[in-house]
Image (cartoon, rainbow, N blue to C red):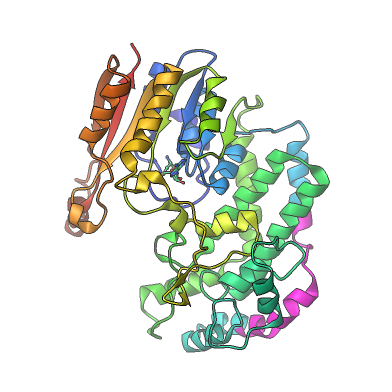
Amino acid sequence: MNKNLESLYKPIQYLGAKTRTLDTIVSECQRLYKKDSYVVDLFSGSSLVSQALYLNNMPVIANDVMTFCSDMSACLLNVAKTTNSVSLLKDAIKGISTYEIGSNFIEPFREYMVYEDRLIKTKDLQGLKELYSKLPVISNEKVEPSAQVKFIRENIGKEAFKYAPLITNYYSGSYFGIIQSIRLDTIRCYIELYFYENRDLWVYAALLTALYSTLSAIVHSAGKHFAQPISITDCNKDKITNIRLFENRSYDVDQLFVGFLKDILSKTGKKKDFSTCISTCYDAQDKSFASLLGNKTISVIYADPPYTAQQYSRFYHIPEVIKQYKYPQLQLYRGHITQGLYPDDKFKSDFCSKTKAKDAFRKVFGLVEKNKCSFILSYSESKKDATGNERMVTRNDILTIAKEFIPNYRVKQLRFDFDYRQLNSSAKVVREKEDKEFLIIFEKK
Ligand SMILES: C[S@@+](CC[C@H](N)C(=O)[O-])C[C@H]1O[C@@H](n2cnc3c(N)ncnc32)[C@H](O)[C@@H]1O
């Protein structure tokens, strides 16, 4: 592994994060990079690629349409960091444990919190199941709406700071525990207040990033994303999801949060020069984004778009809602709130639509043509299209579109064959289903 990558910080468990192909992406970017220019990471996601480029001394413009992704890259690329930032962040760490939201908001949950604590300690699954089914959260149609729920229903779309705690009223008893949710709300409010008082953008991004890391560590879902919480369906103590429930619910939110902040401080402190990187949050097809790039010298654009119909905004709606901290209108399906508790205004990416993806790629190739730069594209091909992970565009579609825009570029394709020889036979079955990964390199001659 590239030595500079030792101080990478993996902020959250992110689907499609480019851990395995990182070394090659970096070396190809290095090969095509020209002094005093930028490399653009068009779909930055977890920020791993952006960090890797930055740690190898290439200034990066990291972009992703999800705002929480651009917070993570702003933090990890040291965007807007000043000489005061580190000491301000250390002060923020000192203040967090004593900060509380109004007790009038916590009081209606107090009894539930006491029960939850006892039930987790005694590993009482049946008790937890009953407790969560009685919880007066916004999605619980079986109980009388509480005063907080009534308030929220009248204030959809409004900011929740200083009002009924959003995370507790939406996600407790499902994605997170009740005690955990109260502390998550408290930390989210603390972050906003701290930003209001100090106006340090890097500290703000760092605190938010540590909060996203905390959400990702404690969430009770398959795969640690937020597409659906795992509900308690039976009380078999040996069932893996039930074992995980107690593990996930036992995490101390404050302890994790502070631990992540210390890790962020140490990893981002390795680069002593303040970064020239930029973190943005545009739809890659947006004209304003094209104009922003138009004013810079770009030598390489790297793109890792989604290729399936699965929208990232569905898997990661919770960090996005928590960033905005406005009471979301929840999506209804056949008159009922969905189990995933999705907001009804999730971003829909054209890259995830069979009818729109080709045009979306045309716009990306248009950017490459306009900026007269090299282009590196990650592509993944599913071995079994019948699994529902059908690609919205094929590799051939992409190569055809490329010919329309950049016919004179040198094209090279790298295919990654990961070494599975060490794995046992059950893992070989997985191998059959593994997606093939490619790097398609369009080099400006
Ligand atoms: C495969 S992931 C990128 C993963 C990233 N390379 C990493 O290592 O973590 C694709 C990303 O594209 C973003 N995205 C989807 N449609 C977009 C669009 N139209 N404009 C900008 N970003 C978009 C998603 O939010 C998601 O983070």
Note whether 352 is above or below 274 in the view shown. below
Q: In the current view of this chain or complex, which residue is farthest to the right?
A: 197
Image quadrant holding the C terminus, namely top left
Instruction: Point out residue 427 in the picture as x, y percentages from the top left corner.
Output: 22, 56
Horizontal relation, residue 130 to residue 431: left or right: right
Which residue shows up at 62% across the image and 63% down it? Answer: 253
Q: Is residue 209 visible?
A: yes
The residue segment tinted magenta is 94-115
Image quadrant holding the N terminus, namely top left
Q: Quadrant of residue 288?
A: top right
Q: Is residue 440 magenta?
A: no
Which residue shows up at 57% across the image and 48% down it? Answer: 68
Q: Nearer the viewer, residue 39 or 116?
A: 39
Horizontal relation, residue 410 to residue 320: left or right: left
Which residue shows up at 29% across the image and 25% down it? Answer: 402
Which residue shows up at 51% across the image and 43% down it? Answer: 65
Q: Nearer the viewer, residue 87 or 104?
A: 104
Q: Is residue 99 magenta?
A: yes
Q: Quadrant of residue 89?
A: top right
Horizontal relation, residue 383 to residue 246: left or right: left
